[in-house]
Image (cartoon, grey):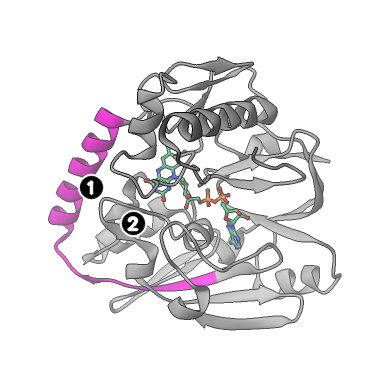
Amino acid sequence: MTDLSRYTTLGTGGPAREFAEPETVAEVEELLRRNDPVATIGLGSNLLVADDGVDALVLKLAGELAAVEVEGNLVRAGGGAANAVCLHRARAAGLGGFEFACAIPGTIGGGIWMNGGAYGGDFSQVLVRALVATADGTGWLNRKELGLSYRHSNLRHGQVVLQAELRLSQRPPDEIKAAVRELNARRKDAQPTNRRTFGSVFKNPDHQLSAGRMLDACGLKGHRIGGAQISPKHANFIENAGGARTEDALALIAEARRRAREQYGVELLHEVQLLGHITIQ
Ligand SMILES: Cc1cc2nc3c(=O)[nH]c(=O)nc-3n(C[C@H](O)[C@H](O)[C@H](O)COP(=O)(O)OP(=O)(O)OC[C@H]3O[C@@H](n4cnc5c(N)ncnc54)[C@H](O)[C@@H]3O)c2cc1C
């Protein structure tokens, strides 16, 4: 059985009942026809996997489903293509608009699922449509059908994002390079970039304080349970401080939610996605 901790940036999680790395649309369609529960992972950069594993067929897209090509102002990327590769190809072609993704260490499929974004940009601003496979068939969905909003889409497990088309606009490569350098420097100043994390734990609440500032004010920076700790640098990040398990991260999440509720009357909603039989308290 494949241990999914190898495939998450936090480095936690148990085995998948079955694991496959399909490389073509036809291969995914064949796997879906079995009608088993299916979940797709990207680079596991926003993912908490249950310690006792996942009772499903877990897919990780490879081959042509992770390839990127550019045609005019359109970038066609496989659902398993890394954002970094897309950005690199776009820059080489003199296409801007995807710079926001420079510090989002995931794939195109994961980015659409989350409507990932940063620094004022997000997938909904560049996505034209996505090719999505289910057990019932494969078809293109546009932005509206995907229901993209703040760190949200309507996608559910069993739907596999096979490919996406992003419409970008012309921008000189040097300008793109400079913009990316600046965004990365801002990121390095504010967030733990050299630790095992899964990005933001919580969505920002409808409150004058961001989730990070609220949890900092609750005194949670550096708070540790088992092998997981709230980042001393940014309180909306959980780090694997050594030997962390998913249950440690879940206990920290529950504690953070409790404190935000008690001190601010705010119900924090998690941004991190869950795989397997786990729930957020
Ligand atoms: C250091 C760090 C910084 C981060 N900064 C940001 C940030 O600034 N902004 C931001 O939005 N996020 C950020 N993240 C979180 C994360 O990188 C994004 O949410 C990213 O889009 C997740 O992509 P992924 O490929 O890793 O998806 P995964 O984490 O593997 O999966 C996330 C969800 O998408 C689903 N999924 C993945 N691929 C597919 C597919 N092909 N078809 C169907 N479903 C799929 C999974 O089932 C899961 O539910 C950060 C993470 C880290 C570790």
Counting from the top left corner in percent of width and height, residue 31 is at: 79, 68
- The answer to whether mark 1 and mark 2 are in CB contact below 8 A is yes
Residue assigned mark 1:
180
Q: Is residue 60 magenta?
A: no
Query: In the image, what residue occupies the spot 18% across and 58% down?
Result: 173
**Location of residue 89 with respect to 126 vertically, above or below:** above
Q: Tell me which numbered mark, 1 or 2, is placed earlier along the sequence.
A: 2
Point out the stretch of residues depicted in magenta.
163-190
Residue assigned mark 2:
87
What amino acid does circle 2 point to?
Answer: Leu
What amino acid does circle 1 point to?
Answer: Val
Counting from the top left corner in percent of width and height, residue 77 is at: 46, 67
Q: Nearer the viewer, residue 250 or 109?
A: 250
Q: Nearer the viewer, residue 94 or 51?
A: 51
Q: Nearer the viewer, residue 259 or 27?
A: 259
Mark 1 crowdedness (10 Å alpha carbons): few <14, some 14-19, many ≥20:
some
If the image is split into quadrants, where does the C terminus sit? top right
Determine the secondary structure under disc 2.
helix
> Position of 263 compared to 189: left or right?
right
